[in-house]
Image: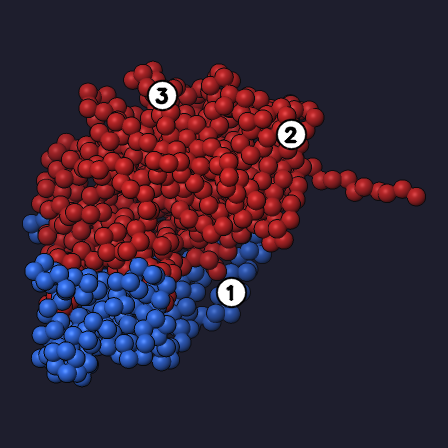
Chain colours: A red, B blue
Amino acid sequence: MFEVTPRRKVYDVCIIGSGAGGGTAAKVLTEGGLSVVMIEAGPRLDPERDFKEHVWPYQLPHRGAGIGGLGKNFGEFLAPNGFWEIDGEPYTTAPGSSFRWFRSRIEGGRTNHWGRIALRFGPADFRPHSTDGMGDDWPITYDELAPYYDKVESYIGVFGTKENVPNAPDGVFLPPPKARCTETIVKKACDQLHITCIPSRLAILTKPLNGRDACHYCAQCGRGCRSASNFSSSQVMIPPAAATGRFTMIANAMARELILGDSGKVEAISYVDKATKSEQRIYAKAVIVAASACESARLLLNSRSASFPNGIANSSGVVGRYLTDSVGSDLAGYFPQLQNFPAHNHDGVGGMHMYMPWWLFGKQNEFLRGYHIEFGGGRDMPGVGNFDRVCEEHEGYGVSLKQKCRSSYGTVIGFSGRGEMIPNPNCYCDIDPAVKDQWGIPVLRFHWQWAENELKMAAHMQTTFRSIIEAGGGTVIAGTRRHPRIESDAAPPSNAPPQNPGVHIAQGGEIIHELGTVRMGNDPKTSALNSNCQAHDVKNLFVADAAPFVSNPDKNPTLSIMALSWRTSEYLLDQAKKREL
Amino acid sequence: MHADSVSRRAVLKSLSLGVVAGSVLRVIPLQAAESAHTMIEAEKTATGAYTPKFFSAADYRTLQSLCDTIFPADADSGGAVDAGAPEFIDLITSENTGYQAQLGPGIPWLNTTCTGRYGKAYLDCTAQQQTEILDRIAWRKNATGDPSLVSAVDSFALLRNMTADGFFTSKIGIKYLGYKGNTYLTEFPGCPPVPGI
């Protein structure tokens, strides 16, 4: 008698993570004929069940604030799910560092609720070292990525206008929506100040596209959109992959380790099935890690073997290094003229209709690189926390307070700068030697220190916001819109002491543009991935989130994640055709 | 066709048909999504009497009174109790130790102070007495000269913020403000013209 071992299933490609990068890879690879298995640390998404689109605050017991109120979570309207803290899945910060790591455990990841800001990086953004001597150049140029930006925009739909702004390339655009009153006021102020203010570029459909309905202008993109009129990986990338019949999704699967085979390639992916807490394995000819920059670095660092004692594909030692986030700073202004507008529907799309790209490119400035400005406010759907400021200014109680709240409703515009951080040696993540998560997987430890350039940039943002507010006839309001209750809430979001007193700069990780931790480059000594996002050390290992990025321009990373993932996937398809995998 | 005339079953059927028909994207047709939304509202059943989770029954009655004093009914709308603010405040406070620490001592302070001054708990005081005591804690400047008022002023300030949250996120509060959105538009009209702006 002999035992028959069932032949184990070997997929062509295993993708770890279902967000912007993983979803794009799944679509391109399955449509190219490969069999793909995707593992996702969170559950499947069901828009009908999970989205709170069009729900009024009074239909929810917490009125949208979520359990425990503001500052304890990301609010209960938001498309599931994500926050800087996840029960049972901690991370640590090194002494003297503060960093907040946002994670989303759900099919589609952060693309379910992201800001839909879809900006191309510009030619100079790929050549930062050549431009100003800081950081490093990418191993690819804008021209090499541009055709993939075209493909992504044509497929997902991005509105915008052709503007020829230096280093902010135009794309394949749908028409933009009309300006709101708040935007009309800010545009006038910017014109006076010679600050470029143009229609924003968001991945929201103003015309039907590829089987999806056009936007219906409820301003609730962040809640998820049942008609998928905005872009999310879960609704726009995963379904076409599934339709090929070559796609398998394993949900609630937390990747633990990449297992190196005798051939020097990844042979299997070990994961924890969260439902049974059991260890499982998947076999694939190639692996694409797209778990989000820091999670991807963590997975590589935790995949140790005799060949790679410091983590798989990390002979260079760069995995976890070069961590950056966007420089963030906020300021709000009160604009009394907004009181004079009649009650009207101000919703529009979920996000700004106009924005300010970096308008001083190529000029001599007191800091390197640049930032763009996002802004919002006006007669939005009333929400928890919106009236803190007027209550605190007016004080008292009674009908006069009520009337003051009404007359000041919709009169505040908040400005947020999002700027480029230059990688520095003090910002990185490594494996905490002592702490493990609830699945027994060693956790990340963050090291963080803003450098002088970022502090100068944040100070410049504040000066600019102030001048726009004043030119627009407004007055500056102390405090920020992001944490409206930080003064009165007894438990602020972080217990870390302020590290940069006097400078309004967000903590590292708060802008949720963390990237660079498995960077690409031509030199295997100073980079983990080659110009195709393929590991120098391990030929069947690819990374397809923001971890490969060599710099963190002031343009939000999602569109570039997708363009780069599309390019990586086409390379992988080509390798498969040549039987190189 | 009016959205209300579509039954939930019919909507769910059309949703599943969309899937069967092979729509590549996980999209719910706009009309069905709109109808599903209308039904969420229609199906919301009237809530019965609320049982406080954090406040004692007596303190909760005082909370209700305070909420209606902060945002009273007037010619334009109902007040904070009509808006369901006390339920919201009690629920959030029951989940947040920071709020508990700041808000919790407020009502006992009010009762102790009223009893000391007027020989009665806050709710049993006359309207004039209630106004007198609230006027001491409704302004921060009062606490700068009298440190014994700091905690009561803080407590009232948080209650005022939370009452505003509860009132302005209610149906009547939203109507009072004149918010016009959360609808389905085929075109966004932009900013209405206002002379001089």
* Badge 1 vs badge 2, beta-carbon distance below 8 Å: no
Residue marked by disc 1: B12
* Helix, strand or loop at mark 3: loop
Residue marked by disc 2: A260
Instruction: Locate the C terminus of chain A by quadrant.
Output: top right
Can the viewer see residue A55? Answer: no
Determine whether A133 is above or below A451 in the image: above
- In the image, farthest residue toward the right: A1
Of residue A510 and residue A46, the one placed in the foreground of this image is: A510
Determine whether A36 is above or below B122 in the image: above
Tell me the distance, in whole angstroms, between the alpha carbons under discs 2 and 3. 32 Å
Q: Can you tell which mark lies on residue A324?
A: none
Host chain of mark 1: B
Q: What residue is shown at x 32% (from left), y 29% (from top)?
A: A421
Pinpoint residue A517: horizontal percent, then vertical percent: 45, 30
Residue marked by disc 3: A135
Determine whether A304 is above or below A386 in the image: above
Quadrant in the picture for residue A570: top right
Pinpoint residue A450: horizontal percent, then vertical percent: 30, 31
Instruction: Identify residue type, mark 1.
Output: Leu
* Helix, strand or loop at mark 1: helix
Determine whether B181 is above or below B87 in the image: above
Q: What residue is shown at x 40% (from left), y 64% (from top)?
A: B37
Pinpoint residue A438: horizontal percent, then vertical percent: 54, 48
Q: What residue is shown at x 35% (from left), y 66% (from top)?
A: B94
Instruction: Locate the N terminus of chain A by quadrant.
Output: top right
Closer to us: mark 3 or mark 1? 3
